[in-house]
Image (cartoon, rainbow, N blue to C red):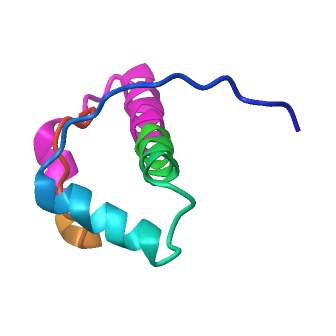
């Protein structure tokens, strides 16, 4: 397995969420705060890439998915919306 190049970034988040992440790390839920955040980013990127691919497949067929379509799907699936998604 090859080493992944890493880069230091600064992230600002609500203090209560940062404290909750630290508590989870302290309880053994993740190797570190950085590892926890990196995993969350990986999952979000995978989700957004999948949604983009789905939108592209529909576009190839002349269908445009509007935010209402995504809202309907989230309601049916019982998934809460997240900010800044590809729609």
Quadrant location, the C terminus: top left
Image position of 24 (left or right of 83): right
> Can you see residue 45?
yes
Q: Is residue 66 magenta?
A: yes
In the figure, 66 relative to 61: above or below?
below
In the figure, 10 relative to 27: above or below?
above
Q: Position of residue 68 (x, y in %)?
A: 11, 46
Image position of 45 (left or right of 70): right
Q: Position of residue 85 (x, y in %)?
A: 24, 37
Residue in the foreground of this view, choosing between 1 and 19: 19
Q: Is residue 55 magenta?
A: yes
Main structural element of the magenta stretch: helix, strand or loop? helix
In the figure, 28 relative to 73: above or below?
below
In the figure, 20 relative to 45: above or below?
below
Quadrant location, the N terminus: top right
Residue that extends furthest to the right in the rendered view of this protein: 1
Q: What residue appears at the point 31 percent right and 28 percent down from the top-left corner?
A: 10
Residue that extends furthest to the front in the rendered view of this protein: 26
State which region is magenta.
47-72
Q: What residue appears at the point 24 percent right and 55 percent down from the top-left corner?
A: 18
The quadrant holding residue 77 is bottom left
Residue in the foreground of this view, choosing between 27 and 77: 27
Q: What residue appears at the point 18 percent right and 44 percent down from the top-left corner?
A: 13
Q: Position of residue 62 (x, y in %)?
A: 34, 22
Residue in the foreground of this view, choosing between 49 and 63: 49
> Can you see residue 73?
no
Q: What residue appears at the point 16 percent right and 43 percent down from the top-left corner?
A: 83
The quadrant holding residue 55 is top left
Residue in the foreground of this view, choosing between 52 and 37: 37
């Amino acid at each position: 397995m090859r080493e992944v190049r890493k880069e230091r970034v600064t992230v600002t988040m609500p203090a209560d969420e940062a404290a909750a992440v630290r508590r989870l790390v302290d309880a053994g839920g993740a190797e570190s705060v950085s590892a926890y955040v990196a995993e969350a980013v990986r999952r979000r990127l995978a989700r957004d890439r999948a949604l983009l691919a789905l939108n592209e497949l529909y576009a190839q067929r002349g269908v445009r998915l509007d935010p209402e379509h995504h809202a309907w799907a989230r309601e049916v699936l019982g998934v809460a919306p997240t900010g800044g998604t590809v729609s």
